[in-house]
Image (cartoon, grey):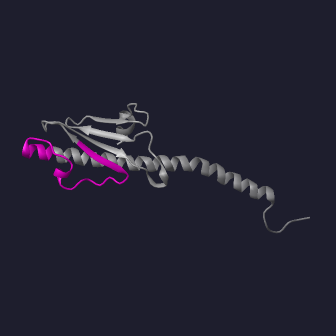
Amino acid sequence: MRRDSGLTLIETLTVLVALVVIAAAAIPLWRTRELRAHRQVAVEALSEIQAAQDRHFAKHARYAELAQLGTAPAAANYTLEIEVGDDKLTYLATARVNRIAGNILDSRCPEMGVDQHGRRFAHDASGQDSTEDCWNNW
């Protein structure tokens, strides 16, 4: 007997399995891309802070707190901080990740920073150095 239309159970299950396999591969890739995009925002914000600090130092011969720099760079999902040394001749700008959409926490690069010499650093969630992984992708 010949069937004219419709899908069999086997055909339907085959399509369903294929969709699950595609989703299983796509979701981690999408998450990685999303986290990298968030890290890029932090890198750009820290670079803006570094440029603003250089301009401020050229004008005033000292580094400034974040509020003194004027407009703070936008870094959604990150808390930006600047720690200025007592002599105002050193600073450390840090971007610490907040919870990202869907409560995803970036455990590879939750803390990134730059100092007055342009030295970049990053630490993973366990406190290990992840500078190479977090900064060298840009």
The foreground one among 97 and 119 is 97
Residue visible at 38% across and 39% down in the picture: 134
Tell me where residue 63 appears, x and y as whole percent. 14, 42
- Residue 117 horizontal/vertical position (percent): 20, 35
**For residue 79, side relative to residue 30 (left or right):** left
Total of numbered circles in the picture?
A: 0
Q: Position of residue 129 (x, y in %)?
A: 38, 31
Residue at the extreme top: 128
Left or right, 7 with respect to 54, comes to: right
Residue depicted at 24% across the width and 53% down the height: 72
In magenta, the rendered stretch is: 54-82
Q: Is 69 within the magenta?
A: yes
Left or right side of 110 for 88: left
Q: Nearer the viewer, residue 124 or 84?
A: 84
Residue furthest to the left in view is: 60
* Magenta run includes residue 60: yes
Indicate whether 52 appears above or below 125: below
The C terminus is located in which quarter?
top left
From this view, report whether residue 95 is shown above or below residue 3: above
Q: Residue at x 71, y 56 (%)?
A: 15
Q: Quadrant of the N terminus?
A: bottom right
